[in-house]
Image: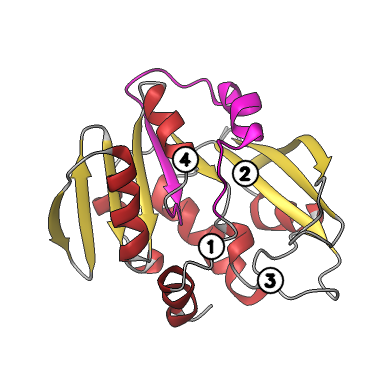
Amino acid sequence: MHHDFWHLRWQNQQIGFHLGAVNPFLLAHFHKLHLRAGQRVFVPLCGKTLDIHWLLAQGLQVIGAELSQLAVNALFAELKLTPEITPAGPLKHYRAANIEVFQGDFFALSQAQLGTVDAIYDRAALIALPDEMRAQYSQQLMTLTGIAPQLLISFEYDQSLVPGPPFSVIKQEVSAHYEAHYQCTALASVLMETGLKGQYPAEETAWLLSPRSLN
């Protein structure tokens, strides 16, 4: 989607995608990534998610990528951290204790800038993008992270009822994007109690994406 769309959403605080609590799927399934304290988790299109607070509390290092400077500023303010801000090519690099965020266009981020990634947590990136961008996104994500293991959360609903975002990403599409490089395991699915945007039936699914052996 065009950058102006997201900038306007943050400017007008139309951020219904921002949850007021840590995502239950993160709490229930993150341990399946088998990370140790000090390892690095990448959170693409992170916004100011409270999930980052939880990841930091586990002793992990968090690297985020986010388009909106307003979102990044809010994230660090809510973490009560004052970041060091430096240029990173066309991006800005925010750094504080155990957290880094690259602010700007996700597709302008390079593997060299990002560094080593031990796991990916994608709650709101794949589903934030329209159909024509999701294949490009998944390829960029794998390139950036060296096909790191991933906890992915998707939504599935009747897209004809309401336009995204969040967009409906059916199970077959998750497999189409990732199965060449990952074993894709659907861990759990739940029907949203209030429906998508309070009215449209929707199912939320947690996925474990485990890199396939190269042998």
Q: Which residue is mark 1?
A: 15
Q: Which residue is mark 3?
A: 164
Q: Where 134 falls versus 116 (above or below)?
A: below
Question: Which stretch did the figure color magenta?
Answer: 18-47
**Residue, x 60% and y 23% (percent of image)?**
32
Instruction: Find the distance from the CA under tag 4 to the CA under tag 3.
Output: 22 Å
Disc 3 or disc 1, which is closer to the eye?
Answer: 1
Name the amino acid type tagged 3: Gly
Q: Is residue 42 highlighted in magenta? A: yes
Quadrant, the N terminus:
bottom right
Residue 173: x %, y % from top left: 75, 59
**Residue, x 48% and y 54% (percent of image)?**
141
Instruction: Find the distance from the CA under tag 2 to the CA under tag 4.
Output: 16 Å
Q: Is residue 20 left or right of residue 104?
A: right
Q: Quadrant of residue 85?
A: bottom left
Of label 2 and label 4, which has the lower sequence position? 4
Residue 33: x %, y % from top left: 55, 26
The crowd level at tag 3 (other Cα within 10 Å; few <14, some 14-19, many 20+) is few
Instruction: Find the distance from the CA under tag 3 to the CA under tag 2.
Output: 18 Å
Q: Which residue is mark 4?
A: 50
